[in-house]
Image (cartoon, rainbow, N blue to C red):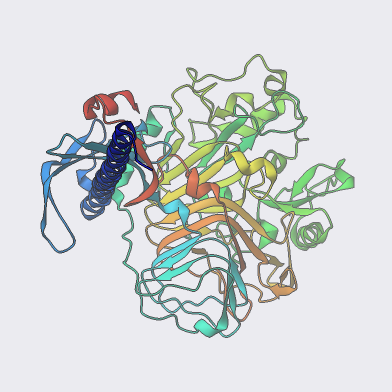
Amino acid sequence: MTRSPNERGIALITVLLVALAVSGIALAGAMWTLNAALITKSGDRAATLNDIALAGLEEGRSQLNANPTVYPETGYVTLATAAPVTDVLGNTVPNVVRSIYVGPDGITGGQYGVYGTIISTVRDTFGNQVVRRLQINQESFAKFAYFTNTEGTIQFANNDQIRGPVHSNDQIRINSSGATFFDQVTTSASSILGESNATFMGPAPKKSVVPIALPTTAAFPALQSRAASASMSFASNLNGNSPGEASLRIEFVALDLNGDGDSTDTNEGFIRLYQDNLRPWYVTGTLSGNPGPNTDIRRSPNCGAALAATNGRFRTAADTNFAGAPSPPTGAARVTAATTLLQSGSRRCYLGGDPRLTAVNWPTVAAADWAAVVGDWPGTGRGWMPRPLGMGAPTTVAAFTNRPDNAYLWPINREYNPAWQGVIYVTGKVALSGVVNAKVTVATPNTIVIADDLRSAVDPGSAGAADCAVILGLFAGTDILVANNTLNAPQQIGGVNPYRTYDETTQEDIHAVLLALNIFGAESYDTGPSSGEACGAVNNGRGCLNLNGGVIQNTRGAVGLVDGHGYVKRYSYNACAATDPPPYFPTTGRFVRNRIYELDPKGFNVASWFAANQNN
């Protein structure tokens, strides 16, 4: 069969079409391959620039930690400007430059910690640019449950329980009686002595870590200035017959102003101040000022009992009419009566200035009786200090105005004291006690004395503590001491056994983060009984020392002995201290990472960014 010319033409066209299709497919494949290669190359380029920017953030943080003085208080500083970039082998990365900037962000005053930003911008010669931001903060010393520069020979013992991060620049020692650590333990030493005696509930301990330097006394002038602006800078002295005595006592007071059944609202925190420059032993309830035989509790004006014979009023052993007798007992009869008083079931000791020591009914004391309580301030330098006339107060709130001591309550909140910055400063020794309802740091270049329980209005272990609205920091230029007084330590009558407790409990509660540039310890921890008060199943001298917060100190001080003298440590960690430290609490100076952000490079201007994100 012979094909027609038309059929041969169709075949030719078909071949051409097929060839064209094959060529198109080949070209498309080539273009797809080329495009994929370009996309891969572009992605690799973007990844490279991103990595260079992230490395710049860490380089900036490393520079700050090597030299913290580089960090500005306001604005920003430039750490690198269009600088060449090298790889891990030291080779210059071609066509790429990087700039690094650092400055504060958010609230820049430092009251709530030191927070900042490092910005790394990277450009190449092809017009590509990335901008990365690292949020940083200076690590607060408040993050530590326990910190020392020097451990000495003191050991963890008697199954001490420490919750929260622990660090020492020295070797940690653990006695054969054991200790339990519930969080990370680090030491700059190469070993932990007695490590096998401890139980580590958290990560394995780290050794040979980089030492951390304590703050210095250079931090105090700025704290005094902040306190003075809110009328919270006070003058004490160094008077006292023992380290645990102080002429000035600050008593924290939490009041239920709105009648909601608690005293935890932000405007319900106050302090009272009692000073006696001649009798610091009375201020802190110690016995050094009661002569012959020395330290006899029967001569103490701080101790006594509430007796039915006196209509339930509190009488001290030093009160000549303490038993309500028609005439004051004298001689041997008085000694016998005082002994009976201090053996009664209602026996108690109180800190100097406590209204119960005046034999008046408290808190329903009449205003006329309160005049006997407050003393003569400032005429004799003795008594409760009245609130300054210019300082605000809830003078229209019945829960406040109905109190006879309302003129002696100083607000530690911004509603009634707008200049309040969260700092109380004392020049000289100061004793502390009471219930705290504020974010507050108490600072002194001298000694802080824990005269009685120092508790938070919001139990640190409760669900209500999650908002971190209440936290106390103590910063002492020398020591922080738990006083060896008639409240904290059991006492004998006339030096004869048994030892008796004169406080409401057989343990001491401290809800605070403590930083001492010398030591934290219990005064005369090796004296008194070795089995006077119980701490759980352990019977020892002074019961439990329940500390919720942290202990930071230069040289480790002792609070008890293995033989039972002093306290058994029950230290727990307040997680708020790491995220919401006390106001202006000292930092380690080391900057730690928070979050990394990607910023839009289009039209980015570093000066504009810091200006828009800083609030003094």
Residue at position x 41%, y 65% from top?
148
Q: Going 58% across and 66% down the picture, which residue do you hit?
A: 182
Q: Is residue 332 above or below residue 220?
A: below
Position of 159 relative to 427 (above/below): below
For the N terminus, the image quarter is top left
Between 413 and 124, the one lying in front of the other is 124
Q: Position of residue 395 (x, y in %)?
A: 62, 16
Write down the quadrant of residue 610 in the picture.
Answer: top left
Indicate left or right for 218 with 238 as reference. left
Q: Is residue 457 visible?
A: no
Q: Tell me, yes or no, if residue 494 can be seen here.
A: yes
Residue at coordinates 42% horizontally, 42% vertically from top-left?
236
Frontmost residue, 359 versus 256: 256
Where is residue 349? Give x, y as percent: 69, 53
- Residue 542 coordinates in the image, percent (x, y): 66, 67
Q: Residue at x 75, y 61 (%)?
A: 335
In the picture provided, is 541 more to the left or to the right than 70?
A: right
Left or right, residue 423 beside residue 258: left
